[in-house]
Amino acid sequence: METISWTDFEKVMIVAGTIMRAEPFPEARNPAWKVWVDFGPHGEKKTSAQVTDLYTAEDLQGRQVIGVINFPEKQIGPFRSEFLLTGFPTAEGVVLAALERPVPNGTRLA
């Protein structure tokens, strides 16, 4: 594993946000949800999330999550992903990275 500098870490915008809605993404190659997240002062952003094994659309709505919001946008089929939703792959499916307690949307990881 390559070591990075503090300056490298500071370039990554890892922030908290709240899922406003999640919808099926039937055009995706792998099962996924379309997810819209409110990142406070950074606005609402959307992504495709392969978390259908462990989360229903109803489970996701209102959940506070952690996203990387300064990657370039990525085209996923007919959908444009604007951020990376963070999680941990397990044998059962991806477990979303979670906050220990609520913080304001847009709060940056330090």
Image (cartoon, helix red, strand yellow):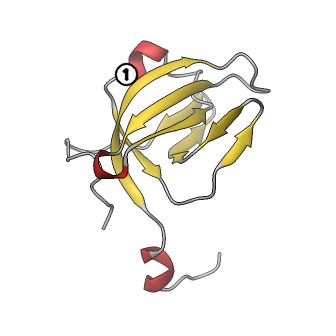
Taking the spot 50% from the left edge, 46% from the top edge, the residue there is 86
- The correct choice, above or below, for 110 with respect to 29 in the image is below
Name the quarter where the N terminus is drawn. Answer: bottom right
Taking the spot 49% from the left edge, 86% from the top edge, the residue there is 5
- The correct choice, above or below, for 57 with respect to 19 in the image is above
On screen, residue 48 versus residue 98, left or right, reads right
Q: Position of residue 2 (x, y in %)?
A: 64, 80
What is the number of callouts on the image? 1
Nearer-the-camera pick, 53 or 7: 7
On screen, residue 90 versus residue 37, left or right, reads right
Residue pointed to by mark 1: 61
| Quarter of the rendering containing residue 105 | top left
Name the quarter where the C terminus is drawn. Answer: bottom left
Nearer-the-camera pick, 74 or 59: 74
Q: Amino acid at mark 1?
A: Gln
Nearer-the-camera pick, 45 or 56: 45
Taking the spot 56% from the left edge, 37% from the top edge, the residue there is 47
Numbered disc 1: secondary structure: loop
Q: Position of residue 43 (x, y in %)?
A: 37, 45
